Amino acid sequence: MNEAGQRIKSFIERVEKMAEEKQVIMDDIKEIYAEATGAGFDVKVLREIVKRRKMGKDALSELESLIATYEEAIG
Amino acid sequence: MNEAGQRIKSFIERVEKMAEEKQVIMDDIKEIYAEATGAGFDVKVLREIVKRRKMGKDALSELESLIATYEEAIG
Amino acid sequence: MNEAGQRIKSFIERVEKMAEEKQVIMDDIKEIYAEATGAGFDVKVLREIVKRRKMGKDALSELESLIATYEEAIG
Amino acid sequence: MNEAGQRIKSFIERVEKMAEEKQVIMDDIKEIYAEATGAGFDVKVLREIVKRRKMGKDALSELESLIATYEEAIG
DNA sequence: GTGGGTTTGTGGCACC
DNA sequence: GGTGCCACAAACCCAC
């Protein structure tokens, strides 16, 4: 295999390794939510909270404000 | 904070932690592709190769699954 | 082709026809949002409004209420 | 209601109308599969067949796309 | 601004 | 009847 081929191989294998790790984490997250379900919590609500926390308070209120504006415009 | 609240908090923080790790990995992958681009390779093609290799690996379990499906259909 | 085969063929072709129509509609929706973007509106907000209207007022307030409950529990 | 409000309303109602039609089609598809089940066929297998046939059709454009990708990579 | 690809969320489905 | 799983569809994001 020539040099270029080796480099390509290297890039691909590094990506594949990362992708595997990512998959493991995704599975972990699913597992946590499964636990939460088992403990009687509502996953949909939990997801929404995580989403909102990630968005940040300012961005959230801004979005809500826009929604309110549009809804008012509609009447 | 009551007990339920603590459990909710725990679930959410665990998810958030996992999500962060995932994001790091996703960034790493992007970085690898950026390197590849810098080295003169075509990212689109590399992604396609990764995809095909994954499909190859997945094909096995897919095959198993399909066999099961058909056997079920017959039986 | 035997009778069973004909029936299977019929089922499949009916499904495929429906699937095509569905795809057309999905494309139409995308187009409408593209128009809205062109008219200077925020698609994300529009989508959120559509979603909320679909959910219905009661379900929406119930969800919000649950989210509030969880968030309060977290503190 | 001002003009902007009217336009927003129009966009949203058009989307909602499309969404309803889409839902009808999705229900129709479900119904067809329900019929097939009643006729003694295995829905899972039927879905798989539809999927494969679609893949077959898509494969053409996919192939074109891949050729383009590689040509681009070479060129 | 548009399109493609990826990721996330929802719903059906089979199994228990 | 409920629960976990899987596949489809929606949303998001980046690159062009």
Image (cartoon, coloured by chain):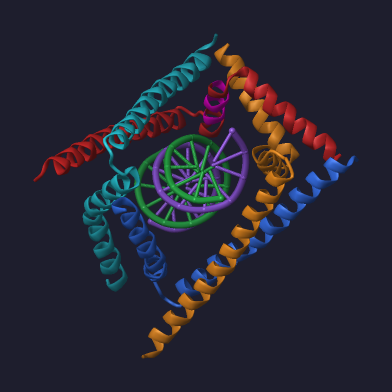
Chain colours: A orange, B blue, C red, D cyan, E green, F purple
The question of residue C49 being in magenta is answered with yes
Residue C49 placed where, x, y %?
A: 56, 25
Prevailing secondary structure of the magenta residues: helix
Outermost front residue: B75
Left or right side of F12 for C19: left
Q: Residue at x 36, y 34 (%)?
A: C26
Q: Residue at x 50, y 13 (%)?
A: D3
Task: Report if residue A55 lies within the magenta region.
Answer: no
Residue D64: x, y in percent? 23, 59
Q: Is residue B55 above or below residue C40?
A: below
Vertical placement of residue C30 versus D4, above or below: below
Picture quadrant of residue D73: bottom left
Q: In the picture, residue F2 is in which quadrant? A: top right
Q: Is residue D9 above or below residue C38?
A: above
Point out residue E11 in the picture as x, y percentages from the top left corner. Answer: 48, 35
Q: Residue furthest right?
A: B1
- Nearer-the-camera pick, E12 or A70: E12
**Residue F14 image position (x, y, % from top left):** 50, 56
The C terminus of chain A appears in which quarter of the rendering? top right
Q: Nearer the viewer, residue B32 or D28?
A: D28
> Which region shows up in magenta?
C47-53
